Amino acid sequence: MKSQKSYLSNGSTAAFVNRPEQSEPPPDEQLLPGFISEDRYPGQDAKLTNGYRRRTFFRHGFALAGVAFTWSSLQGLAHGKGTQAQEPKTAEAALAELKAGNERYATGTHVHHDYGPERAELALSQHPFAIVLSCADSRVSPELAFDQSRGRLFVIRLAGNFVDDNGLASAEYGTAVLGASLIVVLGHSECGAIKATIDVITKNKELPGHLPTLVSYLKPPVEQALKQGGSVEAAIRQNVVTNVEKLKTAGPVIAPLVEEKKVEVVGALYDLRTGRIEFLS
């Protein structure tokens, strides 16, 4: 430290002020915490030095956070583009992708989906590679269970995952217009619609509203399973099998596509406890 005299305009001495030759390093030398040179800036007290270290640390911390955010966004953008440009082109490839996606979901290694970057592209068109006829149960979400982002699955949902005229029309649109090559009928464990149907058959239970109409679609496969001494799980499985066969033979759109091997229809069962999906042969 050097003592410097301060003078008034008339030349008289006003005071003695102790000033450091250089109280702080220039901005371009405040690079990283812990790298301020005590030799080049002698006499700096610990408070001043630590203050600069803290400010430099936060400044570089925010910079690194920005880099991480940018990298994450770029990954999301790349994945969003991939959803449209790199779809499976065959039923075999589509089935392999769904199996791999469920494995990621069940093991907690699912892809981080950044939904923002894909929005602009999906607003222009959609090219789903698979159709999923799923139960409306709130615990079953095909996009999550198969670890897929938006635009990749054409999902039809209603309680009991059965085929009616509206669901069939939707599946026809998904195959003939959107080009999906795979249809999955996805049942699940502990299905309430199947349980209700069993109660109607075995206990003559009366259901309110439009539920009897819904149950009328489920009765044939459930009755078939019960006649064979099956349980609730057997009825759930039989319902999937029945609706797979119904879709395979559904004219005038889907049946010809199946015969030409342009579309494949498969059944699957989702386990609520494990998150794993069993594909039926």
Image (spheres, helix red, strand yellow):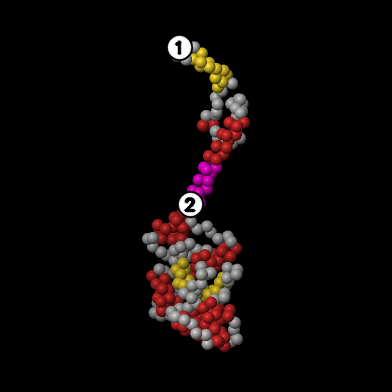
Q: CA distance from mark 2 to mark 1?
A: 65 Å
- Residue that sits furthest to the top in the current view: 11
At label 1, the amino acid type is: Asn
Q: Main SS type for the magenta part?
A: helix
| Residues rendered magenta in the picture | 60-76
Residue displayed at 53% across by 81% down: 196
Secondary structure of residue under mark 2? helix
At label 2, the amino acid type is: Ser
Tag in front: 2 or 1: 1
Check disc 2 and report the residue beneath it: 73
Front-most of residues 175 and 144: 144
- Above or below residue 51? Residue 93 is below
Front-most of residues 202 and 162: 202
Front-most of residues 192 and 103: 192
Position in image of residue 277 (x %, y %):
56, 70
Crowd around label 2: few <14 · some 14–19 · many ≥20 (10 Å): some
- Residue that sits furthest to the left in the current view: 124
Image-based side of 172 in relation to 28, left or right: left
Q: Is residue 89 visible?
A: no
Looking at the rendered image, the quarter that the C terminus falls into is bottom right
Front-most of residues 78 and 22: 22
Residue 73 colored in magenta in the image? yes
Crowd around label 1: few <14 · some 14–19 · many ≥20 (10 Å): few
Quarter where residue 124 is shown = bottom left
Secondary structure of residue under mark 1? loop
Residue displayed at 55% across by 37% down: 55
In contact (CB < 8 Å): disc 2 and disc 1: no
Residue displayed at 51% across by 68% down: 141
Residue displayed at 48% across by 56% down: 114
Check disc 1 and report the residue beneath it: 10
Position in image of residue 174 (x %, y %):
42, 71
Mark found first going from the N terminus, 2 or 1: 1
